[in-house]
Amino acid sequence: MLVTTDPMKAAAAIAAGHLAAVPTETVYGLGALASDARAVARIYAVKGRPADHPLIVHVADAVAFGSWGFRIPTYAHALAATFWPGPMTLVVPRSDRAKDFVTGGQDSVAIRVPAHIDARSLLIELCKITKDPAVGIAAPSANRFGRVSPTTAAHVLDEIGGLLRGGDVVLDGGDCTVGVESTIIDCTGPNPRMLRPGAITTQDVEAATGLKVTHDSTVRASGTLTSHYSPTACVQLLAAADIAAEVAGAGQGVIGLLALAEVETPTGVVRLAVPRNVEEYARVLYAALREADALQLEAVLAVPPAADGVGVAVIDRLIRAAAGA
Ligand code: TXA
Ligand code: MG
């Protein structure tokens, strides 16, 4: 396995049927050529993920999106035009390009055009190598199933470094700038439906489409399992005013605190992050949860941010982290 900062090497590896961990602005993905059944099967093996869980296909642009989808609704095109490249995934009825081994046998496919400069360079190079302008990279987050998504190349190596082989590549594109996974919007019905909150909000989607967003979902999404995004430490959500009492009543183990900078750290508690705003909270969230495990903390007390902007996604991931402990 090669660790590199050169997107061309990652493109060559994927074209040759190997895996490449790919930086995106949300989190790192574990990518394979979306048309290669054997390579895609290795993604599931490395992640330890059930084979019926569908993957996101990453493409270079909205034209490629058109080639993976079938009878894509007008509002989905509006979303693509407004928010791509960016931290948004659209689920649309699939074309013949999207095989069962990528969609988990579903009639829909999840597509994203990432904005990270290295992911873009990789996709453009892969289009050239394969002579296919709609070529796709199937990539879930590059963590073991149910664990916290990686937001640095070092996290990827910690998670799956030992499971990658000769020929596979880890593309180091630095720290992810968003820090939580893409917003997933189901575009298979008359209205957009929010499957997973992210940096693109319900309000953003309603403004771009002029349609009401619905939230109930019957579509499978592994990110919607209750015990997901979970570290080993026990995560507990609470209000800033309740921290002192919680710390006083705690047992022997060391406790960590995750909260906005305005919240003070009580004596004896390990401060895991000091984000100044909700965007920074999202950016540092997963690194902080990993740090809690590295320090073998007993518990993490997390004061959620306000439910504005990406704060909705931060709260969602904190609730899941708490449920998984
Ligand atoms: O930010 C992200 O979305 C990252 C980067 C690498 O793109 N990817 C990511 O992938 O978070 P993953 O596999 O960890 O989560 C993708 C989610 C899963 O919950 C999956 O079930 C859902 O997308 N999904 C994929 N295809 C779907 C489909 N056809 N219908 C409904 N949900 C789908
Ligand atoms: Mg994931």
Image (cartoon, rainbow, N blue to C red):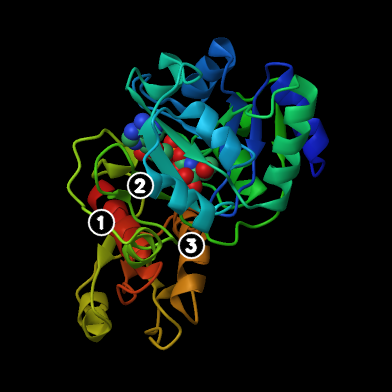
Nearest the viewer among 134 and 141 is 134
- Write down the residue under mark 2: 185
Judge depth for marks 3 and 1 and give the one in front: 1
In the image, residue 162 above or below residue 256? above
Q: What percent of the width, then of the height, locates residue 67?
A: 54, 28
> Residue, x 36% and y 61% (percent of image)?
313
For marks 1 and 2, give the CA distance. 9 Å
**Is residue 188 visible in the rendered structure shown here?**
yes
- The three-letter amino acid code for the residue at tag 1 is Val
In the picture of the structure, the residue carrying the numbered disc 3 is 288
Q: Is mark 2 within 8 Å of ligand 1?
A: no
Pick whichever of labels 2 and 3 is earlier in the sequence. 2
Which is more N-terminal, label 2 or label 1? 2
* Label 1 sits on residue: 213
The percent coordinates of residue 311 (x first, y second) are 37, 69
Residue 212 vs residue 287, the one in the foreground: 212
Number of other residues with Cα within 10 Å of mark 1, as a class: few under 14, some 14 to 19, many 20 or more? some
